[in-house]
Amino acid sequence: MESQSTTQTEVQPTDSIEVLTETLLPLSTTLANISSSNRALSRESRKQTQGIQEQNISLRLISMTMMIVFIAILASLIYLIRDTLTIIMISFLIAYILAPLVDYFEGLGIPRSLAVTGVTLGILAEVVIGLIFVVTTVANQLDQLQASQDQAMVGQVEQILNSLPPVWQTRLIELLRVEVDASGSSLDTQQVIEASMKRLEELIIGQSNQIIGATRGLFSAFINGIIILFTSFFFLSGGRKMKKAFMRSIPNRIFEPILVLLDGIDQQLGDYLRSRVIQTGIIAAVCMVGYVILGLPLAIILGVIAGLANLIPYIGPFLGAIPAIIMVLVGSRFGLGTSLGGIAIITVGVQIIDTALITPLLIGKSVELDPITTVVVVLVGEQLLGLIGMLMAVPLTAMLKLICQELVTQFRGYSRSFTYGSS
Amino acid sequence: MSRSDGIWQEVGKYNDRKKIEQDITALLKQMELFEDLSDRDLRQIAQIAYRRFYAAGEAIVIEGQDAAGMYIIMDGEVEVTKELADGSVVRLATLDSGNFFGDVGLIDNSPRTATVQAVRDSEMIGFFRPELLDLMDSQARLASNLIFTLAKIVASRLRFTNRKLQEAQSEIDQLKTTLETLQVSEADQTKIKTEIV
């Protein structure tokens, strides 16, 4: 039994090795095959990944190109319809400024539609009365200016003619003769003077055509004003419904943050715009009083110009003083030096009042723009929309800054709450 | 049940909006919260309300997020949960049609103290602070009525919280007394043991 068992034990390892070898060899072959096919697969997969990456890069390039093209088209479209956009923007701003007045009347129990109509008609009446007053004043003062200028010119011409030696007087008549008599026919002195007067009339008629052109411009501005007023009316009466319609399209997840964001923007923008209107009004009034004291012609217009020009920081107050300086050259109550000194005092004084009182009390520091940004946006505004662009550039940029600040504040609050809520 | 519609689909949906306002007015009329308000007032409140739809499992308010207003459940069911310091979530309540939540958010913008999510597809009416502030400017009497109603709710909840606090305080006092009695008896036992030794 022992020998048998020994034999058996001696035989067993050999058998086991054979069995193992028989089992392992095919296994190793299979493994080798698998590993080889794996390698092939991984090569294939790498190739595919590379292909997909290349496709992804191409897709990204295509999407970037499309985005750039889209932005370019959008920018061109905005540029093309910039006049219409300006009208919509101004209407929106006017509606924003007038909204508290409408709310006030609504609070008194007047239906909103009636309050909006009343406020709009009131503004229209004020504008029309203001225009009539301004046009009448300007026309009267221009007449006076013209008369004084004519008298001054006649006097100057007489002075010049009298001071000329007789030889030169003759030479002047000869020159006029050449100027008015193209056919070369001989005209006597009287005829030369008459022809000169006729030429002068033609010149005046030419100027009249320019005046007609300017009147057309005024008419166009008046039509734009009416359109702005009507658009403001629709913004005022339908503003709430527009907001509700917009909010209905907002997904639930961001509904509350968007609502709070819009409210924040609404508050900030409303306060800012109303403060700017009050600031412009105060500065215009102060300048107007100063110019009236100085006895400048068109003092009301000059005051309004100074108030509006103040919307352009740094250079605005000085730009606003230029028309007043020109008017001093035309005529004022005091001497040239005193009047120019007076304008300088008014401009600097208004700046001190604005910087020390109005801006800190009405407009917060948060909406201040740095000088470089201010200059750049004013230049861009001027290039896009001319004078209106210059005036609107800073308020619009300040509004954009406020919107961005509110977006950042809300986004921080939202992301904080989201992290807190999901932790 | 339609979800948030596109803005262009909203254009010209005047009749739909009227219908929504009528539905909201009808619902508000049934609520105890608005029982003191006239039909005209309710119609005006309906004009500042938003109707929102939430799918089952969707969060309506999230704990920690700045509050913007309150919600009334028009149709559906919601679950109020709170996350504890150890990260576990406890269910505080389940509310169904006619109930409301987040009312303090209408007055104060402090962060939400709990999360509310829809248990099944639900329809809500939301009132938000910006609109309430506008209403205070344009309809001061109505806004003051609404705020007074809210103040009454907050006051009743404060009374409820105070009662609960008093109950908790008396329970704590009772436990303290028991603990002191136990401590005294332990001291007596120690004294007896010392005497025996």
Image (cartoon, coloured by chain):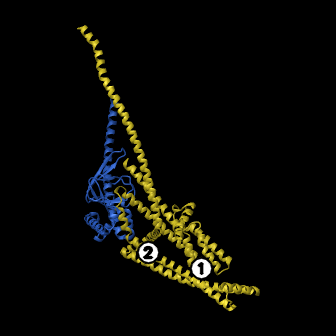
Chain colours: A yellow, B blue
The picture places residue A297, in percent across and down from the top left corner, at 60, 81
The picture places residue A342, in percent across and down from the top left corner, at 64, 75
Type of residue at label 1? Val
Please, which chain is the residue tagged with disc 2 on?
A
In-image side of A220 versus B168 (left or right): right
Q: How many marks?
A: 2
The N terminus of chain A is located in which quarter? Answer: top left
Given residues A416 and B87, the one toward you in this image is: A416
Q: Mark 2, residues whose alpha carbon is within 10 Å: few (<14), some, or many (≥20)?
A: some
Q: Nearer the viewer, mark 1 or mark 2?
A: 2
Q: Mark 1, residues whose alpha carbon is within 10 Å: few (<14), some, or many (≥20)?
A: some
* Residue B108 seen in this snapshot: no
Q: Quadrant of residue B68?
A: bottom left
Name the residue that disc number 1 marks. A292
Type of residue at label 2? Ile
In-image side of A335 versus A387 (left or right): right
Given residues A422 and B109, the one toward you in this image is: A422
Task: Identify the element where label 1 is drawn.
Answer: helix
Residue A79 vertical placement versus A421 (above, below): below
Mark toward the start of the polypeptide (1 vs 2)? 2
Residue B142 vertical placement versus A70 (above, below): below
* Marks 1/2 same chain: yes
Name the residue that disc number 2 marks. A227
Q: Quadrant of residue A251?
A: bottom left
Mark seen at residue B113: none
Q: CA distance from mark 1 to mark 2?
A: 34 Å
Residue at point 27% right, 57% down? Answer: B122
The picture places residue A2, in percent across and down from the top left corner, at 25, 8
